[in-house]
Image: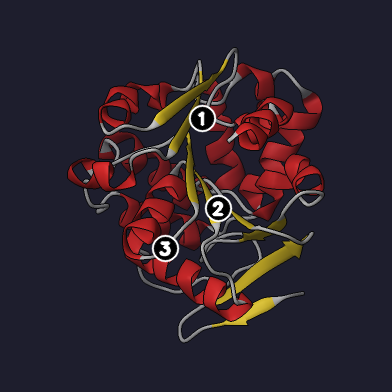
Amino acid sequence: MPVLELADVDLYYRSDGRGKPLVLVHHLAGSTLSWEFMIHDLASRFWVITYDLRGHGKSSVPPSRYTISDHAQDLKALLEYLGVKDPILVGHSIGSLITMEYALKNSVSRLVLVGALYKAPDPIPYMRYMDIATRFGMEALAFYRRLNGEIPVKITESFSLWSRFLQIYRGTSVIGYINTVRGLLESPNYESELEKLRDSALIYGSEDRLKANLDVFKRAGFRYFEIKGTGHFPNLESPEELLRILYSL
């Protein structure tokens, strides 16, 4: 199992294919499994690098909160270890904040944000999520979000996709989730810096609630692509369409 040992965390990563480096940074409570429907196809064209954020999947679980800067430093350390320069970065959800933080301080050839945020989200729902995860576990949190209408219909109505979603959620430890959320809620507001990243690509599912952030990114000059009939997880719901957009950039 390939693991990069850093001072305070061991990062699990995958390396597939060869060519131009393309790095996939997953969502909250995600892992390398979040990209499973896309890696094989991408690896036919790119050197694909995926990894589990600290506290997620097969990476270790440091005991204190993880800031966006911590995650970006992990990403930098991994890319330096692998000898990667000027990567294509694809960041999904919290991964969008991590890749923006990285791209503002390091050279990238292209930045692609999927289901993006530009600042910390409303803390109230996340306080509830942390409470449910603490008391009942990550699978219970996934079911709570499903009952609350927060998981896309394409996932909840498919036995195989829902099973995969649960598998991904279970792969995140409760402590890792809580430490990540605490750091997420302290995320910087990147609105004033988005113009430095202009001409980056932005992708939302048409049913993604985070599409409310669209106007902020468009004013900064981001190129916009929308996947119809899809929610917050196009990597699971519509991987073929997400691949088509990535290949068109």
User: Of label 2 and label 3, which has the lower sequence position?
Assistant: 2
Please report the residue visible at 38 percent of the width from the left and 65 percent of the height from the top.
106
Residue 131, x across and y down, in percent: 39, 45
Decide if residue 43 is on the left or right side of residue 207.
right
Q: Which residue is mark 1?
A: 145
Give the alpha-carbon distance from disc 2 to disc 3, as whole Å.
10 Å
Q: Image quadrant of residue 240?
A: top right
Q: Is residue 47 above or below residue 195?
A: below
Q: Label 3: which residue?
A: 107
Task: Quadrant for the C terminus, please.
Answer: top right
Amino acid type, residue under disc 1 in the picture: Arg
Q: Earlier in the sequence, mark 3 or mark 1?
A: 3
- Secondary structure category for the residue under label 3: loop
Q: Which residue is mark 2?
A: 88
Q: Earlier in the sequence, mark 1 or mark 2?
A: 2
Q: Position of residue 142 (x, y in %)?
A: 57, 36
**Residue at the image point whose x is 73% and y is 75% from the top:** 2
Q: Residue 19, located in which quarter of the rendered image?
A: bottom right
Bin the neighbour count of mark 1 within 10 Å (Cα to Cα): few under 14, some 14-19, many 20 and up. Answer: some
Q: Report helix, strand or loop for mark 1.
A: helix
Viewer-nearest of discs 3 and 1: 3
- Mark 3 Cα-neighbour bin, 10 Å: few <14, some 14–19, many ≥20: few
Residue 158, given in percent of the width and then of the height, sits at 76, 22
Above-or-below relation of 40 to 161: below
Amino acid type for the residue under numbered disc 3: Ser
- Real-space Cα distance between discs 3 and 1? 37 Å
Q: CA distance from mark 1 to mark 2?
A: 32 Å
